[in-house]
Image (cartoon, rainbow, N blue to C red):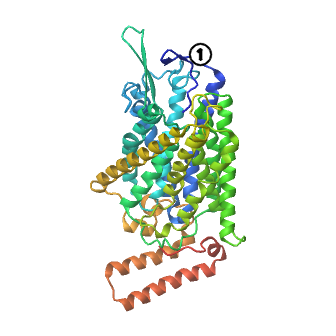
Amino acid sequence: MSNTTEIVGNCPVMGEVDEGDTAWLVVSSALVLIQTPGVAFFYGGMVRRKNMVNTIFLSFAAAGVVMIQWVLFGYSLAFGNGTKGLGNFNWGGLKGVSTATPNADYAPTVPHLAFANFQMMFAVITPALISGAVVERVSSLTWLVFVFLWTTLVYDPLAHWVWSAGSQYSSDGTECTYVTGWLRDMGAIDFAGGTVIHISSGMAGLVISLLIGKRHNVDRKKPHAPASVPFIILGCTLIWFGWLGFNGGSAAASGPLAVLAATNTSIAAAAGFLTWLLTDLAFNKGVKASLVGASIGLVVSLVAITPASGYIYPGYSILFGVFPIWPSYFLMKYKHLLPFDDALDVFFCHGVGGMMGALMTGLFATTDVNPYGAEGAFYGNGRQLGIQILAVVIAIAYSAVGTAVICIFLKYTIGLRASEEGQNDGMDRHYHDEEAFDEGEYMLERIANRVIQKMKAAETNSASSGETLEVALEMTEGKHQSNPELQQTNSGKSIS
């Protein structure tokens, strides 16, 4: 978050509400909000057709849970004027969060409620990002409880450490102590959430995918065809569009800093898209390049630029769309060799991208463009890179341990995984009684799945099992051959 507040003595001074700044923050809140449906479409297009509705459900469910948690006590825990380690409950129920006057510690020219609302959208999208790691196999009830616990125990404290600030006055009002979160106090800089949102969600995705186990009947060496490439591109578009408010709104005011952050955002995104595209072409002899892959590259670059967007010259943002792409690209290319099933590459995209962005911020940041930031290593302050490394390590460790504790608790209470029958039949039909596509389009595929499942349950002999499986596969292939449209939309789709 940016600090554009005038400082008098040790503490900031509240300004008057500016209508332009307020309007920009309200619009930015709407832009960040639209990213969560963007994530839903982005992820929904990537999964198998029988799981699209459930995948979209996970993002919307996260929004519902987090918004209520944020109003009840989440905002107060994350931004309350407490200690360096955690806020308090003074703003519980948004009590004392004014609709008319600013809070000088965060945004001196907009109503306090506008800032709280903007931050709520950040809290909403973070668990929605995590959902990509566990799609096609997480229980709906488990997901609701996980989102509530994770936001309370991981996101809120981490946001407090990196962004919080509070003016604490003496009893007679003559002295003031300005208390900031301990990572902010240490000197860590994170303009819009590289550490708080992306590293934390990436690590959570890695840990929960390890503990929940791999998807049932999925051959990770032969990826299935995405349910809808247009949905993926639609989601990517909404994410990119919303990211202008994500980073630009973090200036907490309209003006030069918002312009800088928003401009850096789109430059990095364009560079990331092209870098992934050209890398793909290089590995495919200049013939083939994946549009879906390039859209992932675009998102990786948006993740990477986030912590630096308000601290660097625009020309450097191109580099944030180049260097973070390659580790993500190669990790995704060979992910089938790894022992965990991060279904939609949350760790490779948000974890790796967030780490790269936070570290590169320690190199390229300069007070020439933002006097409230810091000088990076390339401007003579090598210590800043060390601070950024330490902040990254702390965020990794805290998110990993916190997520593991929550998942282990849930595993041995209400369970983590959806039933094997639900995974085979399709999460949409089994858990929502709703489907994204006409049932007839893949009815025979479901019949084949049921046959295979009953074969295993009955433990029939190998000869009869092979014969029944062959019949099921022939039924499915016959359906594909008799329906050219289905054959095209389901090409590459495995029986699972």
Q: Which of 34 and 251 is in front in this view?
A: 251
Q: Is residue 224 above or below residue 398?
A: below
Where is residue 196? Give x, y as percent.
48, 41
Q: Can residue 238 be seen in this view?
A: no
- Hey, which quadrant is residue 278 in on the image? bottom right
* Residue 280: x %, y % from top left: 66, 65
Q: How crowded is mark 1: few (under 14 residues within 10 Å), some or many (20 or more)?
A: few
User: Residue extending furthest right?
Assistant: 286
Residue drawn at 44 percent across, 54 percent down: 205
Q: Which residue occupies the foreground of this view, 185 or 454?
A: 185
Instruction: Tell me: 8 left or right of 283.
Output: left
For label 1, the residue is 16
The residue under the point 52% across, 83% down is 475
Residue shown at the point (59%, 72%) measured from the top left: 490
- Which residue occupies the foreground of this view, 453 or 178? 178
Q: Which amino acid does label 1 sit on?
A: Glu
- Name the side, left or right, on which 30 lies relative to 195: right
* Residue 117 at x, y percent in the picture: 52, 32
Q: In which quarter of the image is residue 281?
A: bottom right
Most foreground residue, 282 or 76: 282
| Residue that lies at the very extreme toward the bottom in this rendered image | 463
| Residue reaching furthest to the front | 380
Q: Is mark 1 on a helix, strand or loop?
A: loop
